[in-house]
Amino acid sequence: MGNLNKEIRDGDHPDITEERLKSTFDTHKMAAQIYNSQRAADRRNEITSAVLKIPELQDIKPLPFLSREEKVEEAARKIGILSEHLYDLVNVNDGAELYHLNNVVIGGEGNPLALHGVMFIPVLQAQATDEQKKKWLYRAMKREIIGTYAQTEMGHGSNLRKLETTATYDKATEEFVLNSPTTTSMKWWPGNLGKSTNYAVVVATLIINEKDYGPHSFMVQLRDENTHKPLPNIEVGDIGPKMAYNATDNGFLKLNHLRIPRTNMLMKHVKVEKDGTYIKPPHAKMSYSAMVHVRAHMNNTMAYFLASSLTIAVRYSSIRRQGHINPKEPEVKVLEYQTQQHRLFPHIARAYAFSFAGAETVRLYEKVKKDMESGETELMADLHALTSGLKSVVTYLTMQGIEQARQSCGGHGYSMASYISEIYGIAIGGCTYEGENMVMLLQLARYLMKAAKAVKEGKKVEGLVGYLSAPDNRHSLIDRTPEKSYDTYLKTFEHIARQQIFRAFDKLEKMLTSGLPHSEAWNKCSVELTRASRLHTRLFIAQAFARRVHDVVDFHIKEALDDLLHLHLNYELLDVASYALEDGHLCGEQMNFIRSELYRSLGKIRPNAVSYVDAWELSDMELRSVLGRRDGHVYENLYKWAQNSSLNRTDVLPVFEKYLKPLMMSARKNSKL
Ligand SMILES: CCCCCCCCCCCCCCCCCC(=O)SCCNC(=O)CCNC(=O)[C@H](O)C(C)(C)COP(=O)(O)OP(=O)(O)OC[C@H]1O[C@@H](n2cnc3c(N)ncnc32)[C@H](O)[C@@H]1OP(=O)(O)O
Ligand SMILES: Cc1cc2nc3c(=O)[nH]c(=O)nc-3n(C[C@H](O)[C@H](O)[C@H](O)COP(=O)(O)OP(=O)(O)OC[C@H]3O[C@@H](n4cnc5c(N)ncnc54)[C@H](O)[C@@H]3O)c2cc1C
């Protein structure tokens, strides 16, 4: 039998090889769990190997040394080369393969086609009529045109009902007149809008006969297809540098009474007829489909960002030696410290949990998408509730995990050589885009409050909120039953979420009966409401993790995932335990038990730590991190990496003659006086 950890190679740093030799499971089989099939895991590695053979697809130099202009150019250069090789490298109908190819070749900082693939094509697929698809979708898929999704404005992003861009129907000419009447009505933020795209789906408030019909989607050509010059009545540009994600030209757009044909409104579900008659869609929020598409996939992208940071931190922690546990022995790997394990391992468990919850979400999303094709909308509310909660909780916890990974690398974590700060910057955009986290938690809260009301009225609720009408134990059975089962933990999470949902509900009801208008009462309860949404979502994540472990057949993989799940349940429960202590559901003795199980789990995970992150099979090319190198040879490569600094091109910088020398000379002169 070969090595279970598939990353072992001759010449690697002995400290990292020592870790890999301890693996109790086959890392490539574990990759099949993470990427949902052995075939998908194989394909990732095949794509990476093929990319490595194409010299023009390699980074010209480490990305942190590029200026913003160079980053934009480098991403565009690679997109051009990729287009030549695309059909040889991936199945272009497989989103996961395309996403992987992007991560390996270009990375997370963006590229000119980012929004084209992530939102422009999906919105056309979901909302364009067959005729419109012929006109734009097929051209978009062949990349004859490049588009984006332009919804957010300088003044409004969260509250779509108040978008100021108007699309006023002119019956006489059968056109819509698109207009940005104020500075704040300018589209502001859409990815690739600034310089790359020549088309956009613009979301504007539809006005017919002076009546406001709310946000609708319109296809707008922004630039000439040959010269790429902005078309008349269109002002478009880049919004400037951002915290990260700077290879992407997030842009602004001002429309000055721009006329577009009536048939440019995306009309698969909703229609404006020639005479201005408005025909409603089967569900009022069908036009929000592009946002739901991204939200449904965000768990997996966040899991990926988190796993990337942890791969870097855990590998580095296995070669970094500092300090002693036993003074008579050599310095230890920092991974031996319990604090380091506590800092990193629970986040490894979360990355797996997000990936498993993500797979379930994408399955539900695919079902709803298919249903919507035939006008069936029953599950849209469930999907919206689920994705709203997950998008908020997962992005927030990912942010925490990446920052812990950075800190766990000490000083070198702060260097761009770790690349963790870039991953952090890219990932935390997710707390804001596709719905600011608080706003989306409050969307889930609406759904939870409806369910709570139904239960209070004696109705039975099912599905995602089924636990609200299920029997509850007054006291948690953790450490109170002979057999150790996850059910006791999951029941405790259920209890906590249920209590908080009803606490928020009761508070809201009390305010409403006291005569407060609904929106005011809602605002006064909103912190409690967001707490309810978080607890409900964290329950779902834990359940999804447990469901996956339950379904795994391979003994060694099941055992390794079981260890991670055990850690996850104890760590997460400690994090929210105050809710269960408050009403005596958990007692101090049980808290001691949970804590000791957590510490035991850390010890159990320790020998497999490097293998758990290796199982994500993230190549050096896609990690772009000196600290996270697969071979563990960090120090000599840190030194090599620093040679790229433009400050090192000469021994003496011009600033010396210009500023530092005069400063020192004058100081010396003064001290002689
Ligand atoms: C493999 C493929 C790879 C893919 C990878 C993808 C990931 C890649 C990531 C890396 C790339 C990064 C790209 C970044 C892209 C960012 C793009 C954007 O931000 S774009 C810009 C993103 N911008 C935002 O996200 C803006 C956020 N804001 C909004 O979405 C809306 O304003 C709102 C939802 C907050 C309110 O809407 P409003 O109309 O005022 O509605 P009310 O509140 O009055 O509620 C009324 C009822 O409607 C219900 N309902 C609502 N929505 C839905 C739905 N979707 N459905 C069903 N129902 C829905 C609601 O529950 C309620 O029901 P009830 O209680 O009455 O029964
Ligand atoms: C990296 C990145 C990429 C983006 N890409 C795109 C894109 O491609 N296309 C596009 O159209 N847009 C894009 N956006 C814009 C993004 O979708 C919005 O910024 C986002 O939806 C948040 O809206 P906002 O900026 O209006 O925030 P605001 O709503 O102004 O948020 C400010 C604060 O107000 C709070 N708040 C607002 N409303 C409420 C409420 N009802 N209840 C309680 N609190 C509230 C929020 O919680 C937050 O704390 C992108 C943004 C980023 C950062």
Image (tube, rainbow, N blue to C red):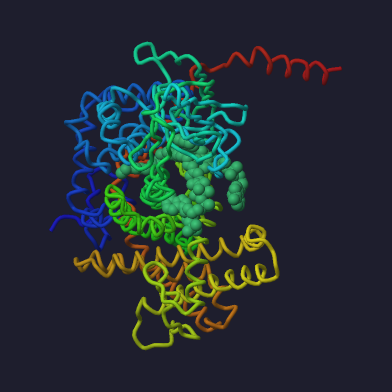
From the top left corner, tell me how far across and down residue 515 is, in percent: 70, 67
Report the number of numbered marks: 0
From the top left corner, tell me how far across and down residue 58 is, in percent: 30, 27
Along the line of sight, the residue nearer the viewer: 357 or 398: 357
Residue 414 visible from this viewpoint: no
Along the line of sight, the residue nearer the viewer: 249 or 517: 517
From the top left corner, tell me how far across and down residue 534 is, in percent: 51, 62
Which of the 4 image quarters holds residue 463? Answer: bottom left
User: In the displayed structure, does residue 80 sit left or right of residue 112?
Assistant: left
70 to 396, vertically: above or below: above
User: In the displayed structure, does residue 640 sit left or right of residue 182?
Assistant: left
Which of the 4 image quarters holds residue 523? Answer: bottom right
Quadrant of the image containing the C terminus: top right
User: In the displayed structure, does residue 65 sit left or right of residue 378?
Assistant: right
Identity of the residue furthest to the right in this view: 673
218 to 496, vertically: above or below: above
Along the line of sight, the residue nearer the viewer: 28 or 32: 32
Along the line of sight, the residue nearer the viewer: 71 or 517: 517
Quadrant of the image containing the N terminus: bottom left
Seen at 52% across and 78% down, the residue is 591
User: In the displayed structure, does residue 127 sit left or right of residue 579?
Assistant: left
Seen at 56% across and 83% down, the residue is 584
Residue 544 visible from this viewpoint: yes
